[in-house]
Amino acid sequence: MDRWFEITRRGSSVGQEVRGGLVTFFTMAYIIALNPIIIGSEADRNGNLISGAPKFLDAARTQVDWAAVGDAKMMVAVGTALVAGLVTILMGVWGRYPLGLATGLGLNAMLAYAIAPQMTWPQAMGLVVWEGILITLLVLTGVRTAVFRAVPPAMRTAISVGIGLFVTFVGLMDAGVVRKPAGSPPVELGVNGSLMGWPIAVCITGFLLLVLLYTRKVRGAMLISILTTSVLAVVVESIFKIGPTFQADGSKKATGWALNVPSLPSAGDFASPDFGTLGRVDMLGAFTQDGHFSSKLFLGLVLLVFSLLLADFFDTVGTVVAVGQEGGLLNEQGNPEHLQEILMVDSVAAIAGGLGGVSSNTSYIESAAGVGEGARTGLASVVTGIAFLLSIFLTPIVDMIPSEAAAPVLAFVGYLMMSQVAHVDWDDVEDGIPAFLTIVLMPFAYSITTGIGAGFIVYCLIKLIKGKAKQVHPLLWAVSALFVVYFAQGILMSLVDKI
């Protein structure tokens, strides 16, 4: 095991890998609760849920069948944990890299809110499978690996720093420390500019505990912080009965728990898992209209699949670079070992997500939290994957961990990754301006892909202006051109509609 995972060579230990793997799981576990809300609650073109059951009780679609929605969400939770567990273990055993994989946020929202309303859920999952097949072909032909290696060093550093700010923003938003107000400005501190409510207090306590443990060099600081903060959250909820932010009647409670309500489960909360989403895939139905091929529909779907592919492609590039730099896992050329295997597993994960009925699975930047805890090898991913598989049967226990307990770790990881900003030569505009755009656009546009795309395009333009176009790798020119299409997809879709 030591030889295969290279534990000793990478300066790690089994205990260190177990701790890192568990930290990665706990920072990712929110997807088990969040993906069902996104995928399991939305109806397709025919008004059906992903389970195949009708979402509405009436033809006018005004009365929601909440029992059917609840069943669909449970199916999605089980499928999410199952697929995440299997592909993360595969990453550990084959890719031998400390990366956790699960349903990609942003990708699942695009599927639920933009794609499924135009077709049936099985057809939408078929598009996800096609996207995964295309990415797999890019890996097999060496294109994806070549693109990864064509990224210049300054951009690699900028991607890592930008992702650090991105995960910090995600953590602060998940805990409600920073949130979107009803009006202006676009974001604000807490509730109306004030830190109010027990959930935020629990989050701040968790962050201060983590800082204390880390500065004291306590092993397992992040894991201890998550578990301790979760216990504190359970105690607070049992005393004050706070409840969730989103109430059952559709109203909002500003000082409620953001996602999971931390409470002790009862025996009745444990039920046999329902794997009903698996295999509900229609590979060809999306490309026909009333049984006939439609060129207009085909062009529109090509743009949708292209958007999924590009987002999935470069989210992974950014994540692999950021995790590798954080853990010192990159070689002199800035590439991780077993790069081909890492990218292949990520590509297969996209296919698995479609076949599992839970949307495309991709690498999670939350893995950087596990690396910050000491994970250096694929053994950590095996631990993370096993935890996901166990969560299929222990969902009520996983639900005890609120996002307010994981958020402090994500915010702290931002600090760890921010230190790399010193490696960019800010006096050189050829590196500095593209790096700046990459760093700021990731959190501000809430998209890793957007930051990478903007940085690539501007990098190529500056080199062209300064007469140094030959210094840019040909693949980087090609990728930048694809990003121009990606950013113009709204215009292109409107043109397709006019055909």
Image (cartoon, rainbow, N blue to C red):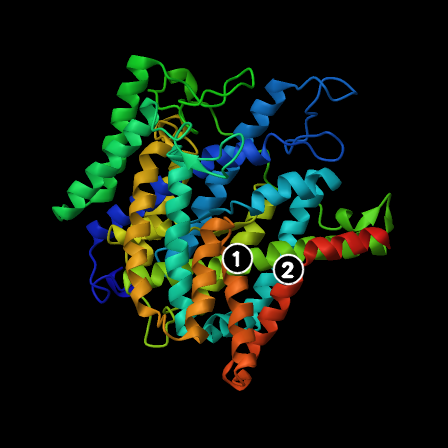
Asked if the residues shown at circle 1 and circle 2 are in contact, with their CB atoms under 8 angstroms apart, the answer is yes
Q: Which residue is at 25% across, 25% downward? A: 232
- Image location of residue 310, percent across then percent down: 59, 59
What mark, if any, has residue 449 been given in the picture?
1
Secondary structure state at the residue bearing disc 2: helix
Q: Is residue 398 left or right of residue 350?
A: left
What mark, if any, has residue 486 been given in the picture?
2
Q: Residues within 10 Å of mark 2 (few under 14, many from 20)?
A: many
**Could you say which quadrant of the image residue 109 lies in?**
top right
Q: Which residue is at 47% across, 67% downward? A: 434
- Please identify the residue farthest to the left as the structure is shown: 216
Q: Is residue 59 left or right of residue 447?
A: right
Above or below residue 61? Residue 337 is below
Position of the N terminus, as image quadrant, is: bottom left
- Image location of residue 341, percent across then percent down: 45, 65
**Residue situated in front as seen by the camera: 289 or 188:** 188
Above or below residue 257? Residue 89 is below
Q: Is residue 254 left or right of residue 484?
A: left
**Residue situated in front as seen by the camera: 175 or 357:** 175
User: Which amino acid type corresponds to the residue marked 2 in the rendered image?
Assistant: Tyr
Above or below residue 146? Residue 392 is above
Task: State the separation of the CA atoms marked 1 and 2.
Answer: 10 Å
Q: Residues within 10 Å of mark 1 (few under 14, many from 20)?
A: many
